[in-house]
Image (cartoon, helix red, strand yellow):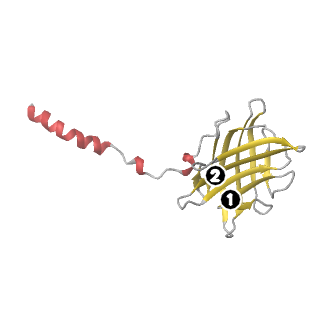
Amino acid sequence: MKKLLYRLILLLPFLFFWGCSDDDNAPQNPINQLPEATQTGENTFGCLLDGEAFIPGGGTNPLDFVYQFVDGGYYFQLQGRKRNDDFNLISINLITRAKEIEEGETYLLLEEALGNASGIFGFNGGLSFTSIQNSGQLTITHLDMNNQIVSGTFWFDVIDHDGNLRKIREGRFDMEFTQ
């Protein structure tokens, strides 16, 4: 009986480690790395940038948002920033100029102009804007003016300063704002 117990004790660690999977090293689906699509003012933002998860972080003010009535019109500006592995500053922005947003509405992301909504990709201070040829959509899924919360989804394409098509997909945000 002692020999059997001794063998079991020796085998248990091997059985334990053999039964453990190596899931921690398995590649994770980039979309699963994005924050959940909530509507409660969680101050979250994320999207896929060329198929890779983009979540603002690090540095000064990585996530900034305002929705305000200024000079006779509403201005929406949401910006997420982070530095990549090469320390390049990357930003994804959504803006409106003199355009009021409404819950349940979808807006085309076109060129930056009064009355439009636009998407912007920034790389080390250089900005690339959506246009009629390379556009996208912003959908406001929740707007609570009393509690100052806006949530939504977005996607867009831009041509960067090097002539590359940048694809922003599966975008989502849930932000508190100031008026």
* Image quadrant assignment for residue 143: top right
Residue 77 image point, x, y percent: 75, 47
Q: Is residue 179 left or right of residue 51?
A: right
Q: Name which residue lies at 19% across and 41% down.
A: 11
Q: How many neighbours does mark 1 have within 10 angstroms: few (below 14), some (14-19), or many (20 or more)?
A: some
The circle on residue 41 is none
The residue that mark 1 highlights is 122
Residue closer to the observer: 40 or 88: 88
Residue 147 drawn above or below residue 26: above
**Residue type marked 2:** Arg
User: Which quarter of the rendered picture does the N terminus lie within?
Assistant: top left
List the single residue furthest toward the front: 60
User: Which quarter of the rendered picture does the C terminus lie within?
Assistant: top right
Residue closer to the observer: 57 or 10: 57
Residue closer to the observer: 46 or 85: 85
Q: Is residue 154 left or right of residue 117?
A: left
Q: How many neighbours does mark 2 have within 10 angstroms: few (below 14), some (14-19), or many (20 or more)?
A: many
Residue 135 image point, x, y percent: 76, 58
Q: Name which residue lies at 24% across and 41% down.
A: 13
Residue 89 image point, x, y percent: 61, 58
Q: Name which residue lies at 24% across and 43% down.
A: 14
List the single residue furthest toward the bottom: 162
- Whether label 2 touches label 1, CB < 8 Å: yes
The residue that mark 2 highlights is 81
**Residue type marked 1:** Gly
Q: Earlier in the sequence, mark 2 or mark 1?
A: 2
